[in-house]
Image (cartoon, grey):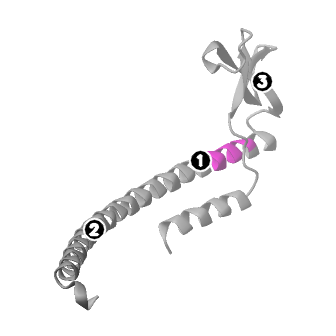
Amino acid sequence: MPPELAIKARIAQIRGSGTVAQPNTWIGYTHINKNGKKYTYYRLVKAVRISKSNDADNPSKSQVKGKMVKYLGTADSEAYKEMQNAIARRNEIQRLERKLQSLDKEVSVVQSKKRQRKQAALTKLVGELVEKVQTLMAEIAWIKRQFVLQLDTNPEKS
């Protein structure tokens, strides 16, 4: 199986194994002290771009802030564990997609090199053909001149 197909199959397998986290999301946490004990609670956070000026299209003048999307609970909760797995799946898919893109770039570089070799051969062939056509045109012009000269020297045959 070609590597591209194997990567695509692996991506499909990962997507089929469970939910995949959205891009630009992560798990944030908060520590709370209650009755002398320290509790940690987790939540799903999404990146939100905040513009401080009127130019909202310019990302250099904006900041990224986390916005809570979903409460996940403690480290023992099912929601937290599932989101950890979803983020791991997302990260693995992103890694495989980058690998696929690099393979595509390698293939396109190899194809362009083959194309350049073919183009060089075609350019040489076209050059030779142009040279032959020019030679034939010169010969035709010479034959025409010879014909005109013969007509001029023998006017009674025409």
The tag earlier along the polypeptide, 3 or 2, is 3
Q: Give the residue furthest to the front.
A: 156
* Within-10-Å neighbours for mark 2: few <14, some 14–19, many 20+: few
Asked if the magenta segment contains residue 85, the reply would be: yes
Quadrant containing the C terminus is bottom left
- x, y percent for residue 38: 73, 19
Which residue is disc 3 drawn over? 67
What's the distance in space between the residues labelled 3 and 1, CA to CA? 22 Å
Name the dominant secondary structure of the magenta segment.
helix
Residue drawn at 60 percent across, 17 percent down = 60
The amino acid sitting under disc 1 is: Gln
| Location of residue 149 with respect to 29 vertically, above or below | below
Which label lies toward us, 1 or 2? 2
| Location of residue 156 with respect to 128 vertically, above or below | below
- x, y percent for residue 117: 29, 64
Residue drawn at 18 percent across, 82 percent down = 150
What's the distance in space between the residues labelled 1 and 2, CA to CA? 52 Å
* Within-10-Å neighbours for mark 1: few <14, some 14–19, many 20+: some
- Which label sits on residue 94? 1
Determine the secondary structure under disc 3: strand
Which residue is disc 2 drawn over? 130
Residue drawn at 69 percent across, 47 percent down = 85
Q: Nearer the viewer, residue 139 or 115?
A: 139
Magenta span of residues: 83-91
